Structure formats: structure tokens, C-alpha cells
Amino acid sequence: MFSDPTSTVIESREGVLLGAKIAKDGQWRFPHNDSVPYKFKQCILQFEDAHFYSHPGINPVSIAKAIVKNLRSNKVKRGGSTITQQVIRLSRKGRGRTYFEKLKEIILATRLELSYSKEKILSFYASNAPFGGNVVGLDVAAWRYFNCSPDQLSWSESATLAVLPNAPSLIYPGKNQKKLIQKRNRLLKKLAANKIIDSMTCALALLEELPPKPYPIAQLAPHLLERLDKKHSGKRVKTAISVKHQEAVNQIVKDTYNDLKQNHIYNASVLVLDVNTKKVLAYVGNTPTDKLHQKDVDIITSPRSTGSILKPFLFAGALDQGTFLPHTILPDIPTQIANYSPQNFNKKYDGAVPASEALYRSLNIPAVRMLQEFGLEKFHFYLQQMKLKDIKYSANHYGLSLILGGAESSLWDITKNYANFASAVNHYRDLQSNYYSNEFLEPLLLQDDTINLGKVSPEKPLFDAGSIYLTLETLTKVNRPMGEDNWEYFDSGQKIAWKTGTSFGFRDAWAVGTTKDYTVGVWVGNADGEGKAGLVGVKAAAPVLFSVFEQLPKSKWFDPPYDALSYAKVCFKSGMLAGENCEKVDSILIPFSGNRTQICTYHKLVHLNEEETHQVNNSCYDFDKIRHKKWFVLPPLMEYYYQQKDASYKVLPPLKIGCLGSEEQKMEFIFPKPNTKIFLPKNFDEKVNELVLKVAHSIMDTKLFWYLDSEYLGETITIHEMSVLPTVGKHLVIVVDELGNELKQWIEISE
């Protein structure tokens, strides 16, 4: 019946207006609403058509009176139209007010009465009547003039809106106030006279002031509105958004923007998900910045460099596949793989670090080595299964940098998978150690949508619950920002599994965290990709994350999925499955796949002299005097950096001179790495800087002899560094220790 374009309207789950987009014809016209509030209904009936429920669409008495009055004055002074007739007139807009047109309206009105109920006709009127300016329909009029929904209107407000369609071009709030208030008051007094309202209500209603000017339409979620408009244009959409959480997050993002713009950081976004329902509770796509700084860009769906935010997915996958155990030590040493040389954020090395610590400290070198051991193709496959849509190229396109921000993903996709991790652990317990086949789902934006989790099965959907749980436990150890440290000592503190990420060039700052019930994702940066010093996850995004969690109900921590875990004995120092030579053993929970991992290779049984200063054997020492001891031994390069961090580490004593037997590798190059191309820069005096060669030796105070292309360079003791100024081209570096062990490395000097 009405074919006019309508506004796209989004509401919260509670029915509160979140935002609306003006109709294509430039009118504020909300989609048809069948519900007409009681107060407005009584007002419009008393003002326009008191006999609405008793006539067949026309009121002959009113028509006759109107004709007589208009003929006497020789112009239209009074209308005799019923509400039904006015609905017909509204649907046939642009028609002249002639007697011929009136006749048509009468015929069509009677047909309308036969086709629809009185309530439906009344709703047609309420949804399409003009309320002044470009405001059409009761729903939008209530929000524009009184900033509330129609069912929240007072008697005075309802009466004001009821008289507006009678002369919308002449009077509306903010214009001709005196005339408008007179009409309103006459209607209120009529309501009291007809016993619809009592005298006290009438007296109070008469005292209410009119709004001075229209309110702007609410825009609590403008980027969500634009997103939904693409699929639901011109419709009224009830979203899953909680207005309470949306308003709180809006304020947090606004405050963050006001702080960060001082450092020329203008954009941020936040996504809040309900873990159990997979529904979106808050959606803030950007800050309230300006067009110059891309305020209209929805960052939630925009691909951005991931930084370190993917590391938990690799950790969970490696645990799930039995690549290592939670605390297995990984090398944290200078690393070059082909032409790729990853660096830790602090440019330092620990030598060896437990995998769990590497994750919660977000160390880059152990992560790259972890990915290399786990398998680049395999990890890429997992990311595809998790529906990270912006990782659309092959694994080789990204290479090992995939784990350090070499790929792009959106806040939407990252946050949903942290939430899916949490729900997988919840469901495993709820389903008595089973899984849903469709666990890794897209979040739901609409309140009436429901999730399809698929079938219940003992088969894991992607990762097993034990691996996910141990990953989440590890993420609770990430150091929190200032003000959130020591959280465990406060009643208000809660356990949160969270991770930050910072992209190369300080362009993207991430923070994503989850509890048993809620997942929050935060991105901060500049939409145009401009990097800024200080734009790191823990400083820029993490404070927002914890501010949002403070607004959410407090959650309990996950119940351990014991049926997906088993106790295993591991070496305290190496974190690997305990062998017979481990000094100290711990019993920890590991995934079942962890029982397939390697027995500890870092602990050895060594044979020492009585003073424990040298290794010995039967060839050089009395067997009865040999002492047998378990010893934690790292490879030379790992050992070189590890002993700088851990003063308790004991270097393995050297083999006693005269004893027969081969020893394991004692030397390793720190710099340069194999087949490295090296450019030697010039200093301020235009002289070429020397190249400093570095070697780690497992035996302290050992003397090393250095050669370059068979030319003797010199010797070093304890600190094994040698400066050299080679010519352009390829050279062979040779290092020999005093025991005759030899180390060789090719290097290439470029211009």
C-alpha cells in the first residue's frame, strides 16, 4: 500500500534505538510498525476521529458538516476526513483536495476497511503521517522531538505529536511554539473532559514545556548501521547489541581518542562478544574523529597487520600436535633462516626459554623457530580452517613472518577465534568430554539469529580442549599494563587470558582477551597506516581492553577439561618428558598428544673426577674414583646467552687431558650466520668499519685461534670476538680451539 523508501533502523536487544539511516528520498521515515502505543492512540482518536471504531471508513455526519461550512465560507475551512480516509490520502500523495478526489477517497476508504482491521489501519496512519520537516511517522517523530521510543511518551508528548499531522508544515517543535502549545492543551483538556485522563494528570501535562528543537537521531553504533544497511537496507533490525555495554564502550573509546590524538593517533575500535551465545554485545568501529582521519572507516572489518596476535593459535596447534610440551625450552638465540632474520622486540636473547614463557612474553625468535618446527603449511591450513578470511595467499607467500605480522587479518576474525577457543573449552565440559562439530563459528549480529553448533562428537573440531585450555592458562600470565598489575591480590580482579600485538613500524596495536563468558578485541592506530612511536599493544590497546572488562559482569575461570589432559613427568629445567638423567622432575598436565613428544635431550649423565673439575673415563682415571652426575647441558650458542640470564647454570667441565673419547660440538658462531651477505658501512671519517666475528665456546677460558682464508688473525680467551677488515667477495672463517676442534663458516662481503 505504501511504497515509499524507508530508513534503515537498528535497535539494541532491549529495543532501544541505536541508529538510523535517512531514507533514499531524504525523509526520516522508519519502517512500518504495527504497534501504536495506548496514549498516542487515545490522543489521535480524540483529535482526529472519535468515532473511528464505529464507522465503516467514512463519517457522513462529519462530511456533511464540512461541506456546509466550506460552502458558506467559499473555501476549505473544515475537513470531514476519517483516519481511514487520511490513510488513503497519505498513500496517494500529491493529489489535489477537490470534491472529486474526496469521492475517490470515500470509495477507497470503505474498501480499506473491508481489507484490514481497525488496528492495522491505525498503524498505517501512525507510520506514515507527516510530523513536520522531513519527519514521517510516529516512531521517528518520538525520537526526533522527545528522544525516546513511542511507548515511552507522556500524555503531554503524545498529545503534541497527535496534533502535528493536522498542519505539519505550519507547526512543529522549534517553530510556532505558541500555536502548537494551544492545540496541545485543547486536546489535553478534551481527554480530561472525556474521562480518558484525570484532572491531576491533565494539570501536570499542561505544565510540560515543548522541546525547543528536534533532537538528532541516535548514532550509538554508526559503523554497525552501515554494515547492516548493506544487507537490510530500509528495514528495522533488532541487533544483539546490549545498549548498556555499547554506551560504556563508546565512552571508553571516546576517552581513549581524546588521550591518543595528542600523539597523533586517531583511530580505535572495540568488539565485545558473548562467548556462550556467540552474539555481539558491543560494536565500536572507530573513534569520534573527523573525515580527515577516516572516521567512517569500520576498523572492525578492515584487514590490518596482525603483529604477534596469532601466536596463541600456533601455541595451541603445537600442543595439539605434540610438537612440544607447555614448558619445553626453545632456542632464543641470533637466528637466520634463509634470508629471514627475526628479532625480539627488546633486541636481546635469553639463550633458552620455556615455550609458555615465550608466548606470554611474546618473544619473536622462539615463535619463528616454533613455526618452523611445527610446519608453515600446517599452520597456514589451521588459519584457513579458523576462517581468517584476509589470509588469502599461500603459505609460501607469507613465509615464517606469518607469525610476526607478515599477514593481515581483521579485529572481527581475530576476536571471534579467541571467543571460539573459550567456547570450545566450555562446551567440552558441558558435553561430558565431547565437542560440537561446528565450534568455530561467525559471531551473530542479530538478536533473533541462533547458532548452529552442529553435531556432538568425540572428534575435536580443530584443536583439542586440553591444548586450548593450557594456551588460555598461559595467556593469563601476560604482564598487564600499569594499574592492572597485581590484579590477583584484589577482590575486583579477575583471571583473563589475553594477548597483545604490535605490527612492524608501530602501525597497529592489538589487545584481545577472553574469560569464560566474554571476549573483547581492541585495535588502536591510524586508519591510513601511519606509524607512531609508542603505538604498541601493551601501552595503547591493553588499557582499553581492561577498561572494557571492568564494565562487563565478572566471570569465573574455566573448569579444567581433565578428560583431555593427563599428568606427565617432565624435567624441571628443559620442560621435556623426563628421562632417567633429569635432576629434578615435575608432574604437570599435558594434552594426550604430548606423550608422543621427545624424551629430554638436554640432561646427560657425565663422569667426573673427584674434584668435579674435569670429565674423565676408564682410559685415564681410576674407575672406583669416578663420580657420576646428572647434568643440564645446552648447545654452545644457547649456553652462551643462557648463562648470562641464569647465574645458576653450570658449564660442563672439559675432558681431562689424556682421556680418550670424542666430545660433542663445543663451538658455534654467534655472528655471522651461514652464507650471510654483509655490508660494511663507513664511519664519520669515511673509513670502512671493521667486521666483528663472534663465537661461543662451551668451555670457559678455552683459547681459540682465528684464521681468515688461511691467514692467521690472532687468538682469544674467554670472550671470543675478533675484528677483521675483509675485502669485497667471499671468505672462509676458520676457528680452532686448543683441543684441536675446528669451526668453519663462509661469509660474503658486498659493496
Image (spheres, rainbow, N blue to C red):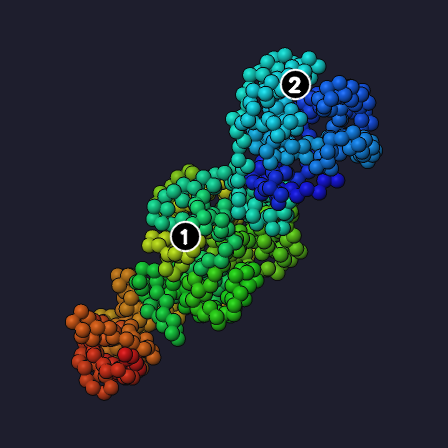
Q: Marks 2 and 1: in contact by CB < 8 Å?
A: no
In the picture shown, does residue 562 fall above or below 640? Answer: above
Element carrying mark 1: strand
In the picture shown, does residue 304 fall above or below 374? Answer: above
Tell me the quarter of the picture where residue 399 sits.
bottom left
Q: Give the camera-side residue of 490 and 586.
A: 490
For residue 413, side relative to residue 77 (left or right): left
Q: Nearer the viewer, mark 1 or mark 2?
A: 2
In the picture shown, does residue 435 fall above or below 14? Answer: below
Q: Which residue is mark 1?
A: 525
Quadrant holding the C terminus:
bottom left
Quadrant holding the N terminus:
top right
What kind of residue is marked 2? Leu
Task: Give me the residue at 71% from left, 42% from top.
Answer: 3
Picture disc at residue 187: 2
For residue 503, side relative to residue 561 (left or right): left
